[in-house]
Amino acid sequence: MRPFDGRTVVLGVTGGIAAYKAVMLARLLTQAGAHVDVVLTRSAKEFVGAVTFEALTGRPVHEALVAQGHALDHIRLAKRADLVIVAPATADFLARAAQGHADDLLTAVLLATAAPVVIAPAMNDRMWAHPQVGHNVGRLRAFGDSLVEPDVGPLAQGEGSGPGRLPEPETLIAHAARALEGLTSLAGRHVVVTAGPTRESLDPVRFLTNHSTGRMGVAIAAAAWQRGADVTLIHGPLEVPLPVGPVAHAVTSTADMHDAVLAALPIADVLVMAAAPADFAPVSVASEKLSKRAGDAVHTVALTTTSDILRDTRAVRPAHAVIVGFALETGGLDAKATAKLSEKGLDLIVGNDATVPGAGFGTDTNVVTIYDREGGREALPLAAKSDVAHHLLDRIDARLAPAVA
Ligand code: CTP
């Protein structure tokens, strides 16, 4: 996972029941290529042991401000960190961090580091709702720390359901990635991404669609959010989970997607149309289920073409916006993709040939060629869709005018 490769992450664990999720987070971060320095507070050790973290990260766990006569552990850890994430953060930890305490290793690291800081609180819902906690969270935000909102769900000890649960490790790692990447590129930009197929009803139980799964568009939305953008993901029925972060807007038909894109575009800096909207829709939708007994052996359905979303965005595109389309072809890629780029008035088009192994629908990889409006052509090798997404965003980033401060 690109943002973590070779980066050093300090994972601070404080003493809450959710500390077990920090174990999984340490594992995910390590698997993503990070060097993970775990810092346990005294009370965290009541819930999880150092040995588990050491086995998963392959690195020593840090606990004391003064260890083996070495008093500068906090400075060493703080200096080499590319990111500090505290998960779970108890109400007590939030209070001490908000006050600038430095009486244990973790609070001292927080004061000494220049790295981005992500804090994921977890506590009982009544504690979370207390104004003292809200005040401390506000202070930490004001210092520039990123706070991950707790999830709503069943709480420990049969305490019912409310906000206070530590989000799942996959959500935490997405926030960590955003904090690492977000400082660099798309912070403050609004990116609209479309993903997946659309469906056109034939009768109350049948529809026309295509094989799009939404993987490519979801990867782009996730990567743009990691880079700090506000992302709106307009999607048809997906075969992959929604990414953490983007605001998702579910649609069914091409007409629905058309309206959603046109509504979102006026405030967008970037539009990436990675969806495969259905190009044809039945001229009329039968009000009752069509019966095979009713007709001959051959059934004819009259189809009309749906509206071309990208073409229709021309009227509402902000002048500075970067507009990107996709072209999935089964031959003649160069000619077809460049024709679509100019017909639809695009800045970039990402072409791929569905007949090439590892490209197209339903795979985690893609083989794409990026064409630009100036006539440039860049063929990328087989790569994970998330890597293709980041490469595309590098190209988009380079085309965006510098943000007004
Ligand atoms: N697209 C769109 N509206 C549609 C169909 C497609 O905006 N009704 C977008 C796709 O999201 C993609 C680009 O247009 O970014 C090219 O889509 P593609 O299906 O390859 O091309 P079409 O214009 O539909 O042309 P054809 O089906 O004839 O190849």
Image (cartoon, grey):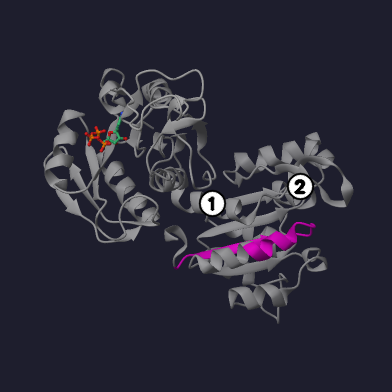
Question: Which residue appears at 62% of the width and 74% of the height?
Answer: 56
Could you give the CA–CA distance between mark 2 and mark 1, rounded to whole angstroms? 25 Å
| Residue 161 lies in quadrant | top right
The amino acid type of the residue labelled 2 equals Ala
Q: Say which residue appears at 33% left-offset and 46% top-offset.
A: 393
Residue 117 position, x and y percent, is: 58, 52
Q: Nearer the viewer, residue 79 or 215?
A: 215
Closest to the observer, 128 or 136: 128
Disc 1 residue type (three-letter): Ala
Q: Nearer the viewer, mark 2 or mark 1?
A: 1
Give how far across and how far down residue 102 sits, in percent.
71, 58
Quadrant where the N terminus is found in the figure: bottom left
Q: Quadrant of the C terminus?
A: top left
Span colored in magenta: 6-24
Instruction: Report the residue marked by disc 1.
Output: 174
85 on left or right of 79? right
Tell me if residue 51 can be seen.
yes
Residue 395 position in % (x across, y down): 27, 46
Q: Is residue 126 left or right of residue 334?
A: right
Task: Looking at the picture, tell me which residue is in the foreground, 152 or 73.
Answer: 152
Q: Quadrant of residue 310?
A: top left
| Location of mark 2 (residue) | 95
**Is 161 on the left-hand or right-hand side of 196?**
right
Task: Kindly tell me whether mark 1's CB lies below 8 Å from ligand 1.
Answer: no
Q: Secondary structure at mark 2?
A: helix
